[in-house]
Structures are given as structure tokens and as C-alpha cells.
Amino acid sequence: MTPFPTSTVLGYPRIGPHRELKRALESYWDGGSTREELLGTCARLRAETWRRLAALGLGALPSNTFSLYDQVLDTAVLLGAVPERFAAAADPYFAMARGTDGIAPLRMTKWFDTNYHYIVPEVGPGTVFRLDAAKPVSEVREARALGFPTRPVIVGPVTFLLLSQAAPGAPAGFRPLDRLDDVLGCYAELLTALAAEGVDWVQLDEPALVAGRTPAELAAAGDAYRRLGSLPGRPALLVASYFGDLGDALPVLADTPVEAIAVDLVRGGTEGLGALAGKTVVAGVVSGRDVWRTDPDRARAALRAVAEHAGQVVVSTSCSLLHVPYDVARETDLDPALRGRLAFAEQKVAEVVELAATPYGEAQAPPATTTARPLPGTPPREGRSPYPVRAAAQAGHLRLPPLPVTTIGSFPQTGELRAARAALVAGELDTAGYEKRVRAEIEQVIRLQERLGLDVLVHGEPERNDMVQYFAEHLDGFAVTRHGWVQSYGSRCTRPPLLHGDVRRPAPITVRWTTYAQSLTDKPVKGMLTGPVTIVAWSFVRDDLPLREVVFQVADAVRAEVRDLEAAGVSIIQVDEPALRELMPLRDAQDAYLRWAVDAYRRATSGASDRTQIHTHLCYSGAEEILTAIDALDADVTSIESARSHARILAEPAVAGFARGLGPGVYDIHSPRVPETGEVTDLLGAALRALPAGRVWVNPDCGLKTRTYAQVEAALTNVVRAARRLRG
Ligand code: GLN
Ligand code: ZN
């Protein structure tokens, strides 16, 4: 076995330091460039990454961490798991990711507790697995041609199947993991093919083993790695776990012939690592999930503890660096004191290299423990009556028709709007000019909604670059970066704010935009706020306070904004919590988390009076699994993603028990496709079978900001038509 170099990373950002991949993809999709041009950009990005990692002195370089869209989708293609209906598309890969005019895309959901989204593969009893190793093999060759031997990174067989969903039409009780044997045949072939390419090490990512797994699933994982481990002539295997400790999966993996195991020592401890005696341990001591500098003493202590048992210790990141931006050095606008606390991908690689280069040494004085401050006072007394009382109070003055039609908040962010914002930032447009532009947009959005016949209007969020960043820019305790982009899905990136201090709201944030919109129309305009959990989940958060305390600080800021909106005469207020689930621990303590997350939401919203209708919105949250918690948020109306999963959620028993207004999404806004009136009618029909008619709302799956006005007008026309048809 070739020994593992002493330092590595489990993966690296791929969108490009200047979001080159985003631009190349979008230009290709719009017909503005050829496939060759797109692939040329991708090859340059990969080459730059390898050169940079090597220049920073990193020992082992990964490959196949690049993706045109998503690594789970890549794995489905690698295994030949392309559902029949996509096979004939002009480009099956992008058809699965984004849909075509005639075919809805595959479902997309959160990658564990990150804000990255993967495409959910479909696996059925009839799926024919056939290896297509072109991508990993060509990346290995490409890197080698540049002088870099690499370690291909591939989603492991167990995680691939655990993240897949049963193909439509699969018999009840079928689970994708039932196909493990067949899939392992492909992985065995792949390992052989990579060995033939001269590859020494292959990394198989198994983060699913970190989430709580059943004994049967753990046994399957053990069998899988015993089988792959016994393959003659194979490369050495690194099984990578991340986003937490392996728990019960650790002894299972330890008991297989795999040579190396990567463990997350930022979220997990070193207990139990004795089971890895003799193996190479890839020690994730530099966090891939936050942007703070690594405490070298803590990292060295972990490395020493690992070294007591491991055959060899490799210094690494806790997970792929996909989840952090490229380079702090570009953030020249940040306060130097804050900048000194930060490490992005580039800096984290340097930390890994540095830790690997210096002896772990003797234990230093134990680091001072931070004492948690007491939580801010108990949550304010709930001022609101039970739902039926509120519902009656609201019906009395809102006078909405049955099946009221609304949207989730944002309307298309046009090129002009983005240009105006860029001009404002660049100092080419003054604030007055910019705000005039925003007001014009609000007026247009209000007129459009009136013309389309919507019942509860929104102002369209034209003043917001992003639903979290916008609030971060207006709250104390946050800083925003200029170039700190991370991939969210496909070509979409977000720029998470840095929550580095105590959070406070110095002044009202949204009131003037909402009241301006309301002044233009007699229909109710819904005020739009982002909830405390989501603001925290989509920021990089200080690590010197318990998370719960940080979320409660943000909840108090939102509460103040709710109060001010209400005082300004806004009668419907939506507080979005699309990320409600994201801060949930992957294993253990999940109920405790949900309890405090719900408390935070209620703290933010319970200052409203009975007459004010509180809406919430969730998407990608696997809402079916937390419906009880969603119900406990006690919002009057909840909109959830549903169109993309064909309203499967409505079959959940908990839906029947859902005690408030519910708007299952009837329009998948993640795809350019416009739904037919008939489709929307069918989805609404399903909702009406599951819920009393008086509690069904009609809305898209999510905000419309990524769509064009042409798509939105066509889609909402059909949505309103369907609602009217059913009202009759
Ligand atoms: N109100 C937000 C919007 O419409 C909600 C977005 C989200 O849920 N991700 O854009
Ligand atoms: Zn949403």
C-alpha cells in the first residue's frame, strides 16, 4: 500500500473564485455558448484548483470533486441510474437536474445539515446499473497530465442508496438499499478501472453513516466494505465520514479491510477511535463548515489523541471545503479585527499544511473554557389566542375567498434590478436613485398581481439581494462579505453573512417597503420577514455562544420588526423558516433542538395580535418528517414545497391532523417549466381530499426570484385559473 501523504482536504469549492462555473453554466443554458466552451471553463477551474492546492503545499490532492451540477447526480450517472424518462432527452444530465419542457426534474433536497442541495436519484427494483467511469477517469488523467497524481472522490455505495428515493411505481416496502449488491458490482468495476489508471487511493464518501442508522443499515455497510475490501488488485480505500462522529458505525467500518477512515474531529470527539488501531486515520481537525480560524491547540490535542491509536495520522479538513468561500484575502472591506478571525478555503488548506508540518508536541495548558452566559429571560408571554379564535378574527376583516391565492414573497430579480444594486454598491447610483428604482418595481409587481387576480399580494422583495443577507445588512452583530460565495445548488450560490457579535435591530427594516406596497392597492399586502432559525442557519455563526442563544437574539430582532409592521397597519405577516430543519443535529438531541427552534419562532411571532395573520413558509425541509414541529410553530398559514414531489406530502397521516391553514406548493419554481392548469387542479384536488377546504391555500413551492416574468405570468395565470375552477 502506498502510504498516505500527511495532509489532505476531503474536497474543495468548484464554483470558481469568481463564480466562473455559474456564469459558464448559465450562458450555456441560455444558448450563449457552446458545450466546448463550457467544458473548457470547467477544465481550467479544475487545473487552477490542483495548482493552487499543490502550491499551498498540500500532500494529497483530491480529484472528481468538481461537478457540472451535483456530485450525487454524477454518481447516479456513474452507476447508470438514469431514469428511463430522461434517457432520450437531448442532455439527460441537465434534464434530470433542471427538467425539460415536457419532463419535471428529479427532486432536490438538502445535503445533510448544509445549505448545499443534491439531486435525489431514483432507484427501483428494475434500475439497471451499468458503470460509466468516464468522469472520474478523465479527471484523474487530466490532473496527471498537469503533473498531479490524485485521489478520486466518489459518493460511497451506502450513502448513494440511502440518499436515493424509490423510483415511481416501486412496490411498497422497496428500499433503494435493497439494491446494494448490484451497485457494489459497479463500484468493484470502478475500483478496477481506477487501479488500471495507476490510482493508489480512492475516497468513498459515506456521510450517511454519521446520521443515526438502523442495525440492518450498519450491517449492510459492513458487508459492502468487506466485499470491496476483498477485491484483488484494488487501490487503497479511504472511507470518509463527516458532519459528525460515526457513533455505532465506527466499529463496523473498523472491522473491514479498508485502509483509511476519515473522521470529523470538529463535530465529533476522539472517544472510540481506539477501534481504528493500525488504520490510517484522516483526522478532520480544520472545520469545513465554518469560516473561523482553527484553534491550533485544540487541533493538536485531537491529533495527539488520534496518534495514540492510528497506524498513521493524516491532517485534514472535517469535510469538503465546498461549504466555505475561496479566499479571505479578497475581503478588503472587512474590519481587520474581524478579518483576522477568519479562514476561508485557501486559509484552511494553509492551516492543514501547517498542522501537518509541526509536531503535535506535548500537551499545552488546557484551553480556557468559555462559560455559557445565561439565556436571555424566559420567552415573552404568548399574547395570542388559540388558532380558531384567531382564524375567526382574521376572517372577519381580511375577507378572503376560499382557496386564497398568494405567492411566497419574491418576484423575478431582473437584470435591471441587479444592475441597479451593483451600481449602488459601486457608487454610480445614489440611494435616492436606487430607491426610486425599487419603488417602481414594487408598483409593477402590485399591478401584475392585481391583473392576475391574486388574493394576498406581496411587494416582491426587489430591495433584497437575498433573504438572509438583507436582514444581516440591517442588523448589528453581522458583517457581509463581497466575494464569499458558496454553492447552493447547480449554478446557484449564496453569500452567507458572518454573524460575529451580539445581534440587535437598530431600526425598522422592512416597514417602509411593505407600507408603500400596501398604499398602492386595496388587496392585503403580506409583510415578508426571514425567521430566526433561517437567518442563523444560512450565516456563518460565531462559535463562542451556544447556538440557541444566538437564535434567540435574532428572534428578538424579528419580534420587534413584526410589532412595527403591525403598528404600521400590515395585517398579514409571513416569517419564513425554510431552514427550520437545518440546524437539527443529524443524530440524537433532535427533539430538544426542535423544541427550542419552535420556541424561537414563537418568540419572534407571538407579539402579533389575533387579527394579524401570521404565515410561515418552509421548503427543502423534509417537511413530512417534522410536521408536528411545523404545526407547533402555530402560524395561521403554512406554505410548503410540494409540487416537485408530486404532493406526496399530502399522503402523510400528520397532514390530516394539521390544525391550521396549509398551502402545499402547486408550482415548482426551481424549474423553468410552466405547469398546466390541469396539473395545478390535480394538486389542489389532492389537497382538498387531505384537508378541509377552508384551510387550503394556493401558492407556488417557493419564491419566484429565479424565474423570468414570462414564466411567472404564465404559471400564475394557470394557478389562478385552477383555484377559480375549484372554487366553483
Ligand atoms: N420569501 C422568500 C422568497 O420568496 C422565501 C424564499 C425561500 O423560502 N427560500 O424568496
Ligand atoms: Zn422556499
Image (cartoon, helix red, strand yellow):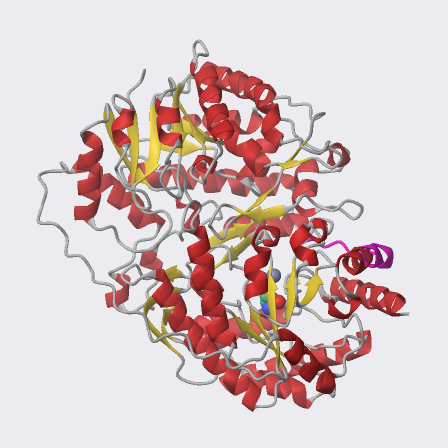
User: Is residue 394 shown above or below 170?
Assistant: below
Look at 55% across and 65% down and name the residue there. Answer: 632
Rendering coords of residue 337 (x, y %): 23, 67
Q: Residue at x 41, y 17 (%)?
A: 235
Q: Quadrant of residue 360?
A: top left
Q: Is residue 4 visible?
A: no
Can residue 168 be seen here? Answer: yes
Q: For the N terminus, give its image quadrant.
A: top left
- Identify the residue at the far right of this view: 728
Closer-to-camera residue (187/113): 113
Residue 388 is situated, as x and y percent measured from the top left of the image, at 66, 76
Between 658 and 236, the residue placed more toward the observer is: 658
Dividing the image into 4 quarters, which one contains the C terminus?
Answer: bottom right
Q: Residue furthest top?
A: 232
Whether 277 is drawn above or below 596: the answer is above
Name the residue at 40% across, 31% down.
Answer: 249
Q: Residue at x 65, y 47 (%)?
A: 28
| Residue 678 painted magenta | yes
Q: Which quadrant of the structure image shows residue 93?
A: top right
User: As drawn, is 371 to the left or to the right of 407?
Assistant: left
The picture places residue 684, in percent across and down from the top left corner, at: 80, 59
Q: Nearer the viewer, residue 663 or 58?
A: 663
The location of residue 420, given as percent across then percent down, is 56, 75
Start-end of magenta stretch: 671-682
Q: Where does ligand 1 appear, by image quarter?
A: bottom right
Q: Is residue 348 magenta?
A: no
